[in-house]
Image (cartoon, helix red, strand yellow):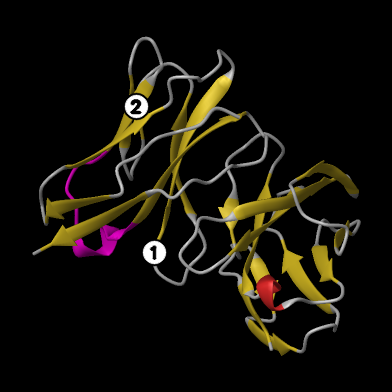
Amino acid sequence: DAKTTQPTSMDCAEGRAANLPCNHSTISGNEYVYWYRQIHSQGPQYIIHGLKNNETNEMASLIITEDRKSSTLILPHATLRDTAVYYCIVSLYGNKLVFGAGTILRVKS
Amino acid sequence: DAGVTQSPTHLIKTRGQQVTLRCSPKSGHDTVSWYQQALGQGPQFIFQYYEEEERQRGNFPDRFSGHQFPNYSSELNVNALLLGDSALYLCASSLWGSGYTFGSGTRLTVV
């Protein structure tokens, strides 16, 4: 599984967009980019995933660069409830998830 | 629609004992994976079950074993418990190839 690199922590003002970067320079052609988040004392929650194209759902948008070596998760209007650890994971479809340390996102009022 | 259900929520065991954790997958899901999350760390993959067979395994000793039943529910067994086995144990279910839904976990404390 390709390794990912994320910033340790980020702050975001409530109501503003939160942009969380992830580097995955060794990603292979058939590996997907997955994003999960974990709010304190809960299990990880699936957010979004993509292969090549940008993706959007009710929670977030995923922007993948053309060379697929990096991606950005965008939470369009962050709220205090979005404070969590965000994990960027690269994996084959259906394969195990290898979690790194993730990014601690703090949304502040 | 019930999500992933894990039991018990908390458990205290003594070193050397054995423990069984249980997981009921989300309705419609057929694949169950187990993860161990130590305090302050990301979840670590233990193994995955599909069609009642272990399909993938992480770097965990044979003291960790599992089972999947015909109704897709699963058990995680840990023998000869060590203090270092204290962690949050997470179960995740999926329909083979789709995104994973995680349960809230079982907090295991070994004393």
Answer whether residue A76 is magenta in the image. yes
Could you tell me if the residues under marks 2 and 1 are in contact, i.e. CB atoms within 8 Å? no
Instruction: Identify which residue is drawn at 33% across, 16% down.
Output: A65
Q: Are marks 2 and 1 on the same chain?
A: yes
Q: Which mark is residue B96?
A: none
If the image is split into quadrants, where does the C terminus of chain B sit?
A: bottom right
Q: Residue B32: tell me if it is visible.
A: no
Q: Which residues make up the magenta segment? A: A74-84
Instruction: Identify which residue is drawn at 60% across, 42% down.
Output: A97
How many numbered callouts? Answer: 2
In this view, A34 is above or below B101: above
Q: Is residue A37 shown left or right of residue A95?
A: left
Q: Residue B46: tell me if it is visible.
A: yes
The chain carrying label 1 is: A
Pinpoint residue A14: horizontal percent, then vertical percent: 11, 57
Identified by mark 2, the residue type is: Ser
Q: CA distance from mark 2 to mark 1?
A: 22 Å
Pinpoint residue A15: horizontal percent, then vertical percent: 10, 52
The residue beneath circle 2 is: A71
Circle 1 Cα neighbour tier, 10 Å, few/some/many (<14 / 14–19 / ≥20): some
Answer with the quarter of the image where residue B6 lies.
Answer: bottom right
Which of disc 1 and disc 2 is earlier in sequence? 1
In this view, B58 is above or below A106: above
The residue beneath circle 1 is: A39
